[in-house]
Image (tube, rainbow, N blue to C red):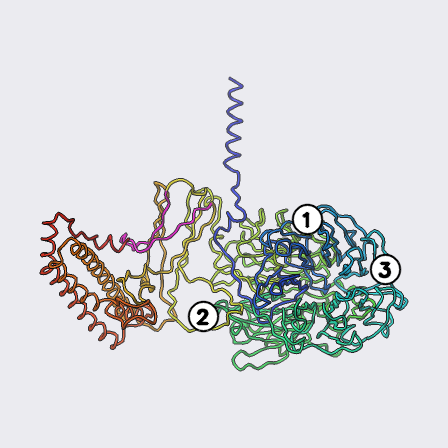
Amino acid sequence: MKRIYLYLIACAFLFVGQAQEEIVLSGKQLFGDLKARHIGPALMSGRIIDLEGHPTNDRIVYAGSAGGGVWKSANGGASFQPIFDDHAQSIGKVKLDPQDPDNIIWVGTGEIWTRNSVSVGDGLYKSVDGGVNWTKVGFEKSERISSIEINPENTNVMYVGVLGALWGDSDERGVYKSEDGGQTWDKVLYIDETTGCGDVIMDPNDPNTLYASMWEFRRSGWGFNSGGEKSALYKSTDAGKTWDKIHNGFPSGKLGRIAVAVAPSDNNILYAVLETEDENKRGLYKSTDAGANWEHLNSDFGLVVRPFYFSRIVIDPKNPDVVVKAGLFGSISRDGGKTFKGMGNMHADIHDILFDIKNSDRMYVGTDGGVYRTWDGGTTMEIVANLPLSQFYHISVDNEEPYNVYGGLQDNGSWYGPSSSPGGVEARDWNVVGYGDGFRVLKHPGKKILYSEMQGADNVWRYDMETMSTKTVQPLQTKGEDKLRFNWNAPMAVSEAQPDRFYMGSQYLHRSEDMGNTWEVISSDLTTNDPAKQNQEESGGISKDNSGAENHCTIFTIAESPVNQQVIWVGTDDGNIQVTKDGGKSWTNTTTNLPGDVPANTWVYHIEASVHGEGTAYAVLDGHTSGDMNTYVYKTTDFGQSWNSIVTDEIYGFARNLQEDFVNEDLLFLGTEFGLYVTVNGGKNWSQFTNNMPPVAVHFIDMQKKTNDIVMGTHGRGVIIIDDISPLREITQEVLAKDVHFFESKPAIIEETSPFGGTATEMEFVGANGSNDVKVTYYLKKKHIFGKMSMEVQDMSGKKLAELSPGKSKGINVVTWNGLIRPPKLAKGKSFAFGGFTSPRMPAGDYKIVMNKGKDRHETTVTLVNDPKSTITEEERKANHETVIKLYDMSEQLAYMVYQIDEILAKAEEVKTNGGSKEADAVIKDLNELKEILVVTTGDNYVASAEPQLRGKLATLYAKIAGGFQAPSASELDNLNLLEERFEKAKNDFSYIQSKRVPKMEKYMEGKGMSMIEFKSFEEFIDE
C-alpha cells in the first residue's frame, strides 16, 4: 500500500511538472508568415569591398559588400541579385573556381578595409551550385579573409589569406594552404598574433609562385595603429613551402599596409603601393623582374591616402602599363605608373576595380556608394541603381501617414523617405537632409522641423521641412569651458514631454529648450575622462589618421524617460551608465551595479528608457572594439541599483540596440551584428527573425506606434520593416496551449487615394510597400496534415463572399484578404476587357472569417473601415457600390446568356449534320446575329479586334466605376441607362428566339432521338 501511495505521489509531481512546462516557439513557428520588407534606399547604395568577374563570361559579375552580402549580375552589371542572404553579410573576398566557375564559388567573409565601423565575418564558405546553397568550410575565428587563390591546373590546391582580428590578438592569421579542395588547411605563412595577410596573389603563369603582403595593425575604440617591423612583402616559388622577403629597393624602417599586383599579361611586372615611415618614400613601386628589384615611381596623394582603407591596385589584363589604384577618388595610369589622373565623376572612396575580360575600356568600380560602370576607360561613370546596400547608423520614424523613416548613412549623408509610396518606394522618394557621414536624424515631435548631424557633431543642422532652410545648432566651446569631446557618432535626443527640448552629448549632457538656439550643460563630465584614450591626433600609426573617428571618453546614448521627464539616462563609450532623477541636478553612475561578467569600460551602445516604469531601462553594451564579441544586454527596474542579464545562448553576435514593445513589456527586439532577435517572454528565450531578413548588422531599431511596425536601420541592407508585430504581443502560455487561436486583427483601412506611381526604370531598386489588406492571423498548435482545411469570408448573415487559402503550419499563420470579391465572369469573346480583372470592393463593415479544420469550425471577425482622411460622403459611396454591383450582375447575366447561345449553336450544328438544316439554319442565323451584338466574335484579343459590343461596353463602364469611390457621374449614369436598354432588348430577342425558333429544332431532335439541349444553372455556370 505504501508503494502505491508513493507511486501516486510521484505521478502527481510528474503531472504537475509536465503541466507547468512552458511552451516555447522559435524561428518559423514563432514568426510564421510575418515577413520583413526592404525599402532601400539604393540611390546612394553602400560600400563595396570586392569585385569578381567570370573568367570566360563577361556578363557575369559578383560584388562583395561591406555589410550587405554577395550580389551577382548576369547581364554585365545592369542589375544584381543577392545570393548569400543566409550568412554573414560582411564580405572580404569572392572567388570563382577557374575550372568550374559556373558552379563553384568561394566567399571569404569579413570586411578588410578596416575603418572604425566595419562589420565582422565568421569564416569561409563554398557553393557547388552557383550560389544557391552554401557550406561553411572553416576559419570561424578569422574575422576577416582578404584573399583566395586557386591553382588553375589543380583546383584542389588553394590558398587563403587571413587578415584576422582587427580589435585584438589572434593566431588565426596569415596564409593557409589546402591540397584537398578546402577540406583541410595548413598555415604556411604566419608572423604573429598582431600581423595578418593583406593580400596573397598567384602568378598568372606559374601557380607555384605566390606573393603575400603581411600587415601589422591594431584598432581600438580610441586609436588605430598601422604598421610595424613585421609588415613585409613575401614571395614563394615552391607553392608556399618557403617564403622570402622581396624588399630590394624598398626604404628602410617600418612598413604599413602594402598593396601588390602582378600583371596578367607579363608576370615579370609587379606593382606595389607602400605605406612607409618616410613620407617621401611612400607610394607606387614597380618591379620588372618578378620582385627581385623595385623602383619608386610615384607618391601622388591619390596613391598614398589612407592606406588602411585604400589598398587595392589593379592592372589591365591586356596591358601592363595600365594601372588603377583605389583611393579617395581613384587614380589611373596609362604609362606604367609614371603619371596618374583621376577617374570620372562618381562617389568618393574607391575600393576595388574590375576590368572586363574582353574590353579593357569597360570597367566596374566599387565605392563607398555602390558599384559604378564605365565604357570609356574610366572617363565617365554610371551607378548601378539597384543595389540596396545603404549603411545606416541610426533611424527614426514620425507619425505621418504613411510615416517617414529618417536616418544617417556611412559616407552618404542623411536622408528621409516614406515607408510606402505609390508603385513602391523609389529613389525619387528619398530626400537628403545632411552631408558627410550621417548619423541621427530626429523629427521634432510637433513641428515640420528635423535635426540632422554629420560626423563628430562638426555640423548639427536644424532643418525646416517647409521652407527648406537650415541653421547650425550644435553646442560649441565657450570661454572658461573645456574643449568638447563629441563621439564620431554623436548622440542627440528629443523630448516627447517638451517638444522644443533637444539634447546632445559630448563629455557633458547639453540641453536646449528652444530647439538648439541656446544650450545649458546639465551634468559634469559623465565619462571616465581617461587621458590615455584622448590622443586622437596620434592615431593612425605610420600614416596619421586623425579623422575624429577615434574620439573617445564621450557620451554615446541619451534617453529621457517617457514616463518621467526628470529621469534621464546616459551611456558612454568608455563604460559608464549614468542616471539622473532630477533633470540633471545630480547624477548616479550605475556601472558598478552591473554583473561581474561585464569587462570594465565596455562601450554602452544603447539605453532604452522604458514606457512601463520610470525606473525601468535596458542597457546594451558592446565590447567588440576591445576584441570581446559577447552579447551584453541588461534590464533594471530600480533606476540601475541592480541590473539583470536577459541574454541567452540563442543570441549569436554582439548587440547594438534594443527596442521594447510599447504594450507588452515582455516583447523585445534586439539588433545584433548578425541580424534581429526577438523575445516574447522578457528574455527567457530569443529567436532570430529570418523571414526575408538576412543576418545583417542591425544598428538601430524603432517602433512606429500607430502601425506597430518594427523599423530597422541596418548597416548594409538599408531600411528593413516588419509590418504590424501586434500578434506577437498576444503570445502567452494560455494562447500556446490552444489548438487554434485567432489573434486580434486591426481594422483595415479602405485606401481611397490613387496617385500615379511606379515610374522607376526597370533597373532601379523599388522598395516594397506594406499591405493594406485585412490580416487574418492565427496560431495552430500543430501543423495541419490530415483532413480538409478551408477558409472563407462571409458577410455577417453568413453569405459567402470569398475563398481564402489557409496556412497550415505549426505556429503563427497570416492570411490576407484585400476586401474584394472575385471579378465578374464575362462572356466569351474576341476582345480584351479590363472589367474581367476588376473586382468589386466590399463596403466598410464587419465580416466573418470562417475556418473549417477537419470537423471543427472556427470563426473570427474582421473589419473594413473607410479612409478617415476621405472627403467622400456615405451617399456617394453607396451610389458607387450599388452601381458597381448592378454592372457586375449585368455582366454575369450577359455571360450566362452568351453561354446559352453557344450551347444552342453547338446543338444546331449537330442537327445540321443529322439532316436538319431547314430547322437549324434559322436558329443559327438569328443567334449569330444576336451574338455579334453582344460580344466581339473575330480578332486576336488585342489590336485586331473589332469595335467593342455590349460585353466590352459593360465591362469598360464597370471597370471605371469600380476603380473609384465616388458616385457615378451623370455621363456614366446616362451611359448605363443606354446599356441597360440594349441589354433588355437583347434579352427580349433571345427570349423570342428561344420561344419561336428553338422549339421547331427541338421537335426535329426529338424525332431523331437526339439528346435535348440542357443548360447548367446560373450558379453552376458562375462557379465553374
Give the image quarter of residue 823. Answer: bottom left
Give the image quarter of residue 818. Answer: bottom left
Disc 2 vs disc 3: Cβ atoms closer than 8 Å?
no
What percent of the width, then of the height, locates residue 748?
39, 61
Dot placed on the residue nearer the N-terminal end, 1 or 3: 1
Alpha-carbon distance for marks 2 and 3? 58 Å
- Of badges 2 and 3, nearer the viewer stands 3
- Of badges 2 and 1, nearer the viewer stands 1
Alpha-carbon distance for marks 1 and 3? 29 Å
Dot placed on the residue nearer the N-terminal end, 2 or 1: 1
Q: Which residue is mark 1?
A: 137
Say if the magenta span includes residue 50: no
Which amino acid, by three-letter code, is at mark 1?
A: Val
Which amino acid, by three-letter code, is at mark 3?
A: Lys
Tell whether 461 sits left or right of 282: left
Which amino acid, by three-letter code, is at mark 2?
A: Pro
- What residue lies at 83% left-to-right and 72% top-to-bottom? 282
